[in-house]
Amino acid sequence: MTDVDKIRADFPILKHKIYGKDLIYLDNAATTQKPQVVIDSIAKYYSELNSNVHRGVHFLSDKATTAYENSRSRIATFINAKNSYEIIFVRGTTEAINLVANGYGNEFVKEGDEVIVSYLEHHSNIVPWQMLCQRKNAVLKVIPVNDDGELIIDEYKKLLSEKTKIVAVGHTSNSLGTKNPVKEIIELAHNSGAVVLIDGAQAVQHTKVDVRELDADFFAFSGHKIYGPTGIGVLYGKEDLLNAMSPYQGGGDMIKNVSFELTTYNELPYKFEAGTPDICGSIVLGDAIEYVSQVGLDNISEYESELLKYGTDKLKEIDGFRLYGNAKNKASVISFLLEGIHPYDVGTILDKMGIAVRTGLHCTEPLMKRFGIPGTVRASFAMYNTKNEIDALVDGVKKAKKMLS
Ligand code: PMP
C-alpha cells in the first residue's frame, strides 16, 4: 500500500482532537471520512456549476448535466456495468433496495411466492422485503448462519425452489465482517429462476466489484461508505429487468408525456430518477470513486486485511475477549464483547480516549438474537487507519475492562 501517512494527510478530520486527544476513527462501517478532493469538489460544484440538470438550455445547466452524466459513466466503469443507463442515482443503499422491492417486487411477486434473505442482513435488506411479502401474501425465508457467522450454503440450497422470486443478500456483513460467496449464491438462485439483489454497502470500499462477473441482477451501495457524501447512492440493475419494472416514484423527469388520461414514462435511467436529484452528491461521488481507484482497491484490500489480522491477534490476547464473526473470508471489522460487560459501557469509555467505535445492534437485530447477545462493540478499519491506532484501541479495551470489571 502507498504510504498511509500520505493517505492520512488527505483527510482533514483526522487532524482533529477529541477531548484533547488524537481522533482515532474506527467507525468506518457506519460511514467513512472524506478526503480533501471530495470536500473541494462539493465547494466547486456550488461555486462554479450549480444549476438544475436535464432541463435548461443555458450554459450552466448544460455543464451540470454533463458532469452529472460523466459521474454516472465513471460509476458504471467502476463496477463494470455494461451501460451507464443501468446506474440509477438514489439516496443510498436503503432507497435502492426499496426501489427494487417496489418496482420489481410489486410487478413480479405474487401470492405464495417466496423471497429469500439471510440472517446477516442489515435491517434495510430485511424490512423492504418483509413489507413486500405482507403486501403480496408472499413468504420471507431466511438463510441461517453458523457460529462463525458464515452463511450455511447447504441450507440455502434447500430454501430455493420454483417459488423463489428474489434472493437479497449482502456482499459483506456490516456487523461481523463476513464476506459471502455471492457469485455462488447468485448462480444457485439463477438455476432456480430467481433474480438476485446484492447489498454492496460494505463491499465497494474494500474489494473490487464486477457486477457482470458476478452476474448480479441488482447491486446497491451508498456513497458515504466509500469516502463520498451522505444522501447519494447507487442502484445498478440489468437493463432488461429495469425496463420491465414499474417506476418507484412519480414526478418530473421520470416521464415522457403527461396527460390526465395517460402518462408515459421516460427511458432508463430517468424513469427511476423522479424530481431534482442530488446533483452535487452524484458528481462528488464520481470524484470519491476516482480517489479510491487511484489508491487502488487491491492495495486497500491488502492493507485492511493486514490491519484486521493485527487487531484480531492483539485483542484476542485480552482475557475475557469474545470475538463475534470468525469467517474465513472477512472484511476489516472486529465485533466483540468483554465477558460480563455491556458493549455500551466499553464504547463510552473508549470515546473518552478519543476512540470512535460503534456499539449496539448495528441494524442487525435478528443476527444479534441469533447469537443471544445484546449487541457488540465494533471496530471497523479503513485505508487511513494504522497499527498505532489499533495499539491504542487494545490499550483502551484493557483499561475499559479494568474499570468495568
Ligand atoms: N446494508 C449494509 C450492509 C449497511 O452496512 C448499511 C449501512 N450501515 C446499509 C445497508 C444501509 O445503508 P444506508 O443507510 O446508507 O442506506
Image (spheres, grey):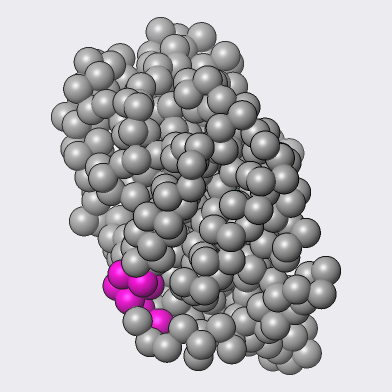
Residue 181 picture location, percent across and down = 25, 42
Quadrant the C terminus occupies: top right
- Residue in the foreground of this view, choosing between 233 and 291: 291
Quadrant the N terminus occupies: bottom left
The answer to if 299 sits in the magenta stretch is yes
Residue located 47% across and 21% down the image: 370
- Residue in the foreground of this view, choosing between 121 and 361: 361
- Horizontal placement of 46 versus 7: left or right? right
Residue 372 picture location, percent across and down = 52, 20
Q: Hey, which quadrant is residue 118 in on the image?
A: top left
- Horizontal placement of 350 versus 69: left or right? right
* The magenta segment: 295-303
- Residue at the extreme right of the image, as rendered: 19
How many labels were placed on the picture?
Answer: 0
Residue located 26% across and 45% down the image: 328
Residue 147 picture location, percent across and down = 35, 27
226 in relation to 260, above or below: below
The answer to if 319 sits in the magenta stretch is no
Residue 205 seen anywhere in this rendered image of the structure: yes
Residue located 57% across and 14% down the image: 134
- Identify the main secondary structure in magenta: helix
- Residue in the foreground of this view, choosing between 151 and 337: 337
109 in relation to 297, above or below: above
Q: Hey, which quadrant is residue 362 in on the image?
A: top right
Residue 333 picture location, percent across and down = 46, 52
- Horizontal placement of 141 versus 51: left or right? left
Residue located 67% across and 62% down the image: 355
272 in relation to 47, above or below: above
Residue 357 seen anywhere in this rendered image of the structure: no
